[in-house]
Image: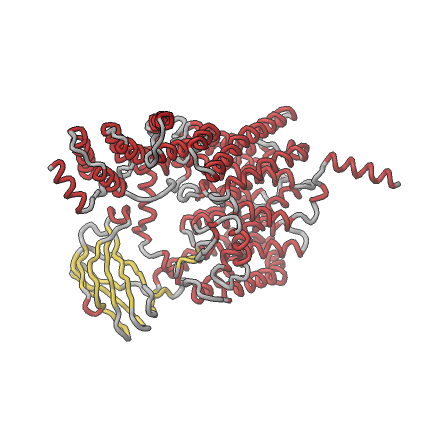
């Protein structure tokens, strides 16, 4: 008997070595996924990739039988997107930027493959396990983010562990006072996109849970994610998830729609109540233990579980057989719409506390106005206006600043919005404020009776939202970059590298805030086709799977998640963020796992084809592993001993950041007495670097050439620098400071300086922004060129 048992055990291990992990692996997988997502940040992403790549290869080899069955059209489409991103490493404008962006993509892809290998069981179980891991990891990030404004009993140890590896998680504030939480990832809009996926997956997992304990776990995750989503309050994410909810209801089985709708409704009510309580008590800069957020989280989770246990089933049974369910859903949606409209219009007074600023918006017509107010103490007000140009540039014009009881102001003709900023030196009850003028009168909204304060604060200036308007500028400038290389793009990271060369005024952003535009810039039409193809193939998989009589219970939730991702990608940087990409890629992997076989093309994926796909993916990972290892070794070599031979060796070793080592070599020769061989090497490196399009390299090369007496080459590099980063005022100031430092009594110098000034004047004449240099520089220019 013993021999027979051992033989069977060995047979099971070799046929499925991960079977032993299927039970009890969920908590460990949740924690590991959370850690890997968190350690995808800039200063640890290389180490994370060096761990994930071999781990993926080993697990993929051991679990090859599982993985072969899970090669589907959506997974192949995802692999093609990843491969296209990898190809851009060979021609990207900046190898350093491109590597950083690609490592985020690669880490997400590896995590997806790992979960596909580790998801065991038969039937629905692999998909449910994989979705539960993602749901749990996202809920854990929501818990940590909420606790940042609460007790910090949870967030302190978690972030303390992460801080052992990365400086990113040290000294997080957790909240934008009075507005919203910013999350442990320091980006509330991206966080809302992540945690919204958690909400949708949790809904699907709750509906398809048969055991009470399992259902309760998913309900808790649902409430954590829902509360974190509302507290982050991203308007773009909120609009797109509302559409996703409707899609979810349409995709869900008819007999389950009542249960889904009631679950959505219960979660919404409890979440809004908890969020309102938190916003009234703990939405300011954290200064000590604030128990309300954590208590609201625990209480809301318990209440949702209790409602589901004692109320939900009876209500579901009553509604499921009713033909009036669609009418009921439509009625409640209409009631919510009416409520939101009323909530935005029903206002009253507000309490001004010392040090606080109450910012409110109004839209008066052009003309002269005076303010009148009812308050029990002195109030100061600053009144400012924005026109379209101001909203694009995040600037404003102050119309009045002083005491509220003496305020009068003139609204210009091109005004889009007027902001009133109220402050008081002591606690004051501000009951009402109104403005009166020849062109009309109205009241300034102060306190909103039916809205939590953080939502009311975010809605100010909604009809002239400067973030939304500026995004249109990002899109337009992104299309200018796209036209430089429309077929294959400029390479990952090129938007950040080149954006200042096409701006009509200076602004700082690394991304286009629209992934469709971002894809065009980075990977061209080919990359956009691949990305849209990934979404389309995934959508086809969900749609065709849903048409079948038997389909995976998570199919409707995955369809809603896909709609949410595709819509949110048009307004935010989600597909270029280290924390969001793993969640999105895992959803694509889930769609392939749960729905991929429904696509007709899947029947052509024979065993040999699938093996070929996996072999190609493995070869791709192996091929990238060595240059990545060399990249880290080159960095370590130079960090340990910065010498000219080590820098030259690093240039040869590193296929990604070689330009950094070249530039360091060149710059270090300026302050050292070097021999002819080193000078010759520096000149060779400088010549190669001068061919690059870069936002900093030409500046250092200009310094190098001017220091070594080559004025004409130095001037040429200055001209390249100011042309490529022309929108940034600091660029011009640095350029003139450098030229002043290397002042020469030479015709070529004076002519070059005059040409640089002409470029600045021409830029000012042609663009919305204005370049200004300091008085010392103006005097220098007047003295040298008149």
Point 64% across, 24% down: residue: 608
Would residue 438 be found to the left or right of residue 581 on screen?
Answer: left
Of residues 59 and 701, the one drawn nearer to the viewer in this rendering: 701
Can you tell which quarter of the image residue 684 is in?
top left
Of residues 356 and 452, the one drawn nearer to the viewer in this rendering: 356
**Total numbered circles:** 0
Point 22% across, 64% down: residue: 435
Please provide percent x and percent y for residue 529: 45, 30
Among all residues in the image, which is located at the extreme bottom?
376
Name the quadrant of the C terminus. Answer: top left
Would residue 780 be found to the left or right of residue 735 on screen?
Answer: left
Q: Is residue 434 above or below residue 475?
A: below
Of residues 199 and 25, the one drawn nearer to the viewer in this rendering: 25
Point 51% across, 33% down: residue: 628
Name the quadrant of the N terminus. Answer: top right
Of residues 460 and 650, the one drawn nearer to the viewer in this rendering: 650
Please provide percent x and percent y for residue 686: 34, 28
Q: Is residue 64 above or below residue 35?
A: above
Q: Is residue 274 above or below residue 122?
A: below
Residue 214 in view in this figure: yes
Can you tell which quarter of the image residue 442 is in?
bottom left
Would residue 72 be found to the left or right of residue 184 on screen?
Answer: right
Among all residues in the image, which is located at the extreme left?
786
Please provide percent x and percent y for residue 643: 43, 34
Residue 132 in view in this figure: no
The colour scheme used to paint the residues is secondary structure
Can you tell which quarter of the image residue 524 is in?
top left
Please provide percent x and percent y for residue 478: 34, 36
């Amino acid at each position: 008997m013993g021999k027979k048992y051992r033989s069977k055990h060995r047979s099971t291990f070799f046929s499925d070595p991960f079977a032993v992990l299927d039970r009890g692996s969920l908590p460990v997988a949740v924690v590991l996924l959370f850690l890997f997502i968190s350690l995808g940040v800039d200063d640890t992403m290389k180490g994370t990739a060096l761990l994930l790549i071999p781990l993926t290869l080993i697990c993929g080899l051991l679990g090859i039988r599982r993985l072969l069955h899970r090669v589907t059209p959506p997974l192949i489409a995802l692999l093609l997107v990843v491969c296209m991103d990898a190809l851009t490493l060979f021609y990207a404008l900046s190898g350093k930027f491109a590597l950083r962006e690609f490592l985020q993509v690669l880490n997400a892809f590896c995590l997806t493959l790992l979960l596909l290998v580790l998801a065991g069981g038969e039937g629905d179980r692999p998909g449910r396990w994989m979705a539960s891991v993602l749901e749990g990891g996202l809920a854990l990030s929501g818990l940590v983010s909420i606790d940042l404004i609460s007790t910090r009993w949870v967030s302190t140890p978690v972030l303390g562990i992460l801080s052992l590896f990365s400086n990113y998680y040290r000294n997080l504030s957790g909240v934008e006072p009075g507005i919203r939480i910013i999350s442990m990832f320091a980006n509330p809009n991206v966080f809302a996109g992540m945690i919204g996926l958690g909400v949708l997956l949790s809904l699907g997992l709750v509906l398809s849970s048969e055991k009470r304990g399992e259902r309760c776990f998913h309900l808790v995750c649902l409430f954590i994610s829902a509360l974190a989503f509302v507290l982050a309050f991203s308007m773009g994410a909120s609009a797109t998830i509302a559409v996703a909810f409707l899609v979810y209801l349409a995709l869900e089985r008819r007999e389950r729609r009542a249960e889904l709708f009631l679950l959505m409704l219960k979660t919404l009510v409890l979440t809004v109540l908890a969020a309102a309580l938190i916003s009234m008590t703990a939405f300011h800069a954290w200064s000590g233990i604030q128990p309300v957020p954590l208590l609201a989280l625990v209480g809301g989770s318990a209440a949702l579980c209790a409602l589901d246990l004692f109320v939900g089933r009876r209500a579901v049974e009553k509604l499921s057989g009713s033909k009036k369910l669609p009418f009921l859903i439509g009625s409640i949606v209409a009631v919510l719409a009416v409520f939101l409209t009323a909530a935005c219009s029903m206002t009253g007074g507000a309490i001004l506390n010392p040090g606080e600023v109450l910012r409110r918006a109004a839209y008066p017509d052009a003309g002269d106005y005076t303010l009148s107010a009812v308050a029990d103490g002195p109030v100061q007000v600053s009144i400012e206006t924005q026109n379209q140009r101001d909203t694009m540039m995040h600037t404003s014009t102050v119309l009045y600043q002083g005491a509220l009881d003496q305020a009068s102001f003139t609204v210009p003709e091109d005004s889009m919005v007027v902001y009133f900023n109220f402050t008081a030196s002591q606690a004051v009850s501000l009951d009402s404020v109104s403005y009166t003028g020849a062109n009309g009168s109205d009241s300034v909204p102060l306190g909103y009776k039916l809205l939590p304060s953080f939502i009311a604060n975010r809605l100010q200036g909604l009809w002239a939202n400067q973030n939304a308007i500026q995004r249109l500028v990002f899109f337009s400038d992104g299309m200018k970059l796209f036209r430089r290389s429309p077929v294959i793009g400029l390479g990952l990271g090129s938007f950040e590298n080149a954006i200042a060369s096409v701006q009509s005024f200076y602004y700082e952003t690394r991304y286009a805030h629209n992934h469709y535009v971002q894809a065009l810039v980075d990977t061209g039409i080919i990359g956009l086709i691949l990305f849209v193809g990934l979404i389309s193939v995934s959508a086809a998989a969900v749609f065709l799977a849903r048409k079948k009589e038997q389909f995976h219970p998570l199919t409707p939730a995955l369809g809603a998640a896909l709609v949410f991702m595709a819509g949110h990608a048009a307004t935010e940087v989600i597909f270029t963020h280290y924390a969001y990409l793993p969640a999105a890629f895992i959803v694509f992997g889930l769609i392939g796992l749960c729905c991929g076989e429904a696509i007709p093309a899947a029947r052509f994926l024979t065993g040999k084809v699938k093996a070929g796909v996996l072999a190609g993916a493995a070869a791709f990972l192996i091929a990238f592993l060595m240059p990545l290892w060399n990249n880290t070794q080159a960095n370590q070599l130079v960090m340990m001993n910065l010498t000219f031979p080590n820098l030259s060796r690093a240039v040869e070793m590193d296929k990604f950041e070689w330009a950094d080592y070249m530039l360091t070599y060149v710059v270090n020769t300026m302050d050292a007495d070097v021999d002819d061989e080193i000078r010759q090497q520096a000149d060779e490196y400088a010549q190669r670097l001068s061919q690059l399009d870069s936002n900093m390299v030409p500046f250092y090369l200009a310094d190098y050439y001017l220091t070594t007496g080559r004025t004409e080459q130095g001037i040429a590099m200055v001209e390249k620098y100011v042309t490529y980063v022309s929108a940034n005022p600091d660029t011009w100031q640095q350029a003139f400071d450098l030229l002043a430092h290397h002042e020469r009594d030479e015709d070529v110098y004076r002519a070059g300086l005059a040409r640089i000034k002409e470029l600045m004047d021409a830029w000012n004449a042609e663009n919305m922004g204005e370049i200004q240099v300091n008085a010392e520089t103006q005097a220098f220019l007047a003295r040298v060129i008149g």
